[in-house]
Image (cartoon, helix red, strand yellow):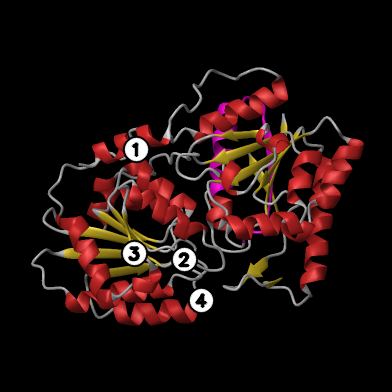
Amino acid sequence: MRLMVYSHDTFGLGNIRRMLAICNYLLDSIPDISIILVSGSPAIHSFRLHPRLDYIKLPCIGRDREGKLSAKYLRTSTEKTIRLRSELIKTTAVHFQPDLLLVDKKPYGLQSELKETLTYLNTHKPETKLVLLLRDILDRSEVTISEWEKNQYYQAIEWFYDKILVVGMPEVFDLVKEYNFSTTIVKKVNFCGYIRRELGLKSGSTIRQELQIKPSEKLVLVTPGGGEDGYRLIDTYLQSFIYQTSEVSIKSLIVSGPEMPSSQREALSQVAQNNPNFKICEFTDDIISYMEAADTIVSMAGYNTVCEILSLSKRAVVVPRTQPVQEQLIRAQRMSSFGLFRFIHPDNLTPENLLETVMEQLNSTSKHFSPVSRLDLDALPRIEQELSQLCFGKMAWELSPMEHNEEDLQDLILGSVK
């Protein structure tokens, strides 16, 4: 089985991390599968890649906070860079001849760069199966519907795609209803649940020993994901300790992210160096090991980070981004309403209330909760099942479908955190 995976990647690490998790699981689970990943992520070389995964690196396209696109490194126009990317994607498909193309998020790709590839496969290799992967939430309903109508995404799905796999749950966000999917499209949709993150390379106790955390001390991990827009969260966290009066000894590990501008990272390091309880690093490809070691996590609300928090049943304080899309805000609002973590709207973020909320999490005497008792985290085996069925015409193995309703989900989750 030859699988080609497309991940456009313009902002942050979310898309590439999610697609790598899927690729790794498929490579470990399906015999004789061959995967080539086509990605524009500038950080793909920083990840620990599966020994049987290869990739084509596309020229980077950047996106600012207003959503405007431009060539990130090349001194060429956005249009010429997109054209180059489009040619590279099509050439990969022509020579690799995939049995299945898995597309992340955008049915026609970034700026329609996938159109020629879809047309080629439809004309010259019509037996190739096409699958669209959507995360749980894209953006506000009216914004997404407008974008999809403008870019003819609904038609693209009806014309080209065999399946839509959603890595989320309708009880949290029902994108079929929210984004006004037609009856034809609804028949192609399968909700797969969220992606459970595997344990890291090191145990939590090993990490705490390496960081020299004493048994009496608390460890807070601060991570804004890729870090491109994470400066304010980290700076607010650092400033918050001016107001600390608690006798609890707190050590903080801050992972700024590889895409944070160097000037901002240096400014944060200047503040942190005056306090021995702060340690800052730029990046780790084993963030989940540090999450396991932490007593509380302070983060944004990206899909992967939230899945990691929930997989480990960790206490967390989440501050979502609200621009250029409101996906993180919606996720934080919906999941915090189930009691899965504490949520602070960025408009209300201050050093005082951030410290207060972190201390509440650290000082909680309630039983360590397990909020994932019925939050479905079986996306990876379910994706494997769906792709195997599509390509081989039979189930790789049986996995029960999600059969939750919203009231049961809320009752069970809230009951588990009391």
State whether residue 91 appears in this view.
no
Q: Is residue 72 above or below residue 83?
A: below
Residue type at the position of mark 2: Arg
Find disc 3 in the rendering and name its residue. Answer: 344
State whether residue 182 appears in this view.
yes
Find disc 4 in the rendering and name its residue. Answer: 261
CB of mark 1 within 8 Å of CB of mark 2?
no
Find disc 1 in the rendering and name its residue. Answer: 372
Q: What is the spatial separation of the Cα atoms under label 1 and label 2, in whole angstroms?
A: 24 Å
CB of mark 1 within 8 Å of CB of mark 3?
no
Helix, strand or loop for disc 1? loop
The residue range painted magenta reads: 18-41
Instruction: Please name which of the two marks, 1 or 4, marks the residue nearer to the observer.
Output: 1
Find disc 2 in the rendering and name its residue. Answer: 321
x, y (%) of residue 195?
48, 40
Residue type at the position of mark 3: Ile
Q: Earlier in the sequence, mark 3 or mark 2?
A: 2
Residue type at the position of mark 1: Val
Q: What is the spatial separation of the Cα atoms under label 3 and label 4, in whole angstroms?
A: 24 Å
Question: Camera-side residue: 164 or 223?
Answer: 164
Helix, strand or loop for disc 2? loop
Q: What is the spatial separation of the Cα atoms under label 3 and label 2, in whole angstroms?
A: 11 Å
Question: Camera-side residue: 189 or 47?
Answer: 189
